[in-house]
Image (tube, helix red, strand yellow):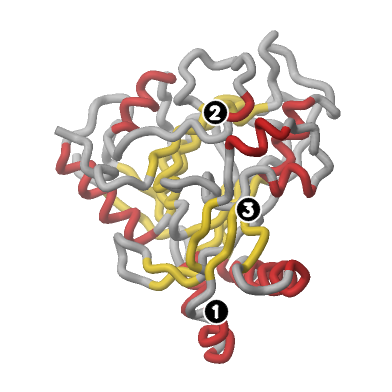
Amino acid sequence: MSLMLTPLHPVFVAEASGLDLTKPISRADACAINAAMNQFGVLVWRGQPLTAQQQIEFATAFGPLDIGLKRVFKRPERLEDERLIDISNVGNDGNVQNRDSPKNLSNFANQLWHSDSSFMHPRAAYSMLHALVIPSWGGETEFADLRAAYDTLDARTRAMIADCCAEHYALHTRILLGDDAYTDEQKNMMPPAVWPLVDTHAGSGRKVLFVGVHARQIIGLSTAESRLLLSDLLEHATQRDRVYVHKWQVGDLVMWDNRATVHRGRRFDLAERRELRRTTVNDTPEAMLAVA
């Protein structure tokens, strides 16, 4: 079968079907998925019982994988392959962690609107999140389209930010939430990345309002003015009529473009197990061209 798409939201997001992601995909299928991502920004795949290795193989069809903050923390991981990012409240002993555990403190930052690895060079292109265990309530993931955010900006704001750049810092959100136990060495391992506030999405050619909570400073403005403006822009980008809420089912794989969207996780009962695995593709020249 070939890729089939069913729109799930008036602005972006489609449900994808017709392909079995547990099997290697062809270059033609990868190109079709890439074209769908350029159009919709987020694809939802249902009923995909992927093993860890199958998820890695699917992700690497689109480029080299990013391990994110693992290069800073360098602590023991629950998942054996470092290319898999453990989005869970489960510790290395297999048990649900206490509410105030370091793992939960780190995970809380995922509940803020962000693009994965916007604080890096290269930044992230696609992320793929696969659901293994879901709680009885909450834990949804919300997405907003940054292209639609730019399209709906007023003319005055567009002109004001046309040439602005923002500094994105890896630990900004964690420090904001009170998790500030980082050494100078750790802080220096992740120097800020600077990106235009108004960017052009390479795949669709559309303008993007590239904001998110990793952005801490607009170059050339005071910290106070920067943070107020960044807050206003992010509020604009995440208006409810431009947000898709994904309610997870076991076996779901959701794939999104970090250059065109922001996302956040929602609250759930931390005493209940929630396990998802993420793979993320770097935004490099060879990204989306890796399938032989």
Quarter of the image where the C terminus is located: top left
Name the residue at 73% across, 31% down: 183
Measured in 3D between alpha carbons, the distance from the residue under mark 2 to the one under mark 1, in whole angstroms, is 33 Å
Q: Amino acid at mark 3?
A: His
Decide if residue 83 is on the left or right side of residue 1: right
Task: Identify the image quadrant of residue 71.
Answer: top right
Decide if residue 131 is on the left or right side of residue 37: right
Q: Which residue is mark 3?
A: 214
Image coords of residue 129 (percent x, y) = 50, 36
Image coords of residue 275 (percent x, y) = 61, 26
Name the residue at 74% across, 67% down: 223
SS at badge 2: helix
Q: Are marks 3 and 1 in contact (CB under 8 Å)?
A: no
Give the label on residue 161, or none: 1
Within-10-Å neighbours for mark 2: few <14, some 14–19, many 20+: few
Q: Which residue is mark 2?
A: 71
Q: Amino acid at mark 2?
A: Arg
Q: Amino acid at mark 1?
A: Ile
Quarter of the image where the N terminus is located: top left
Within-10-Å neighbours for mark 1: few <14, some 14–19, many 20+: some
Image coords of residue 240 (percent x, y) = 64, 68
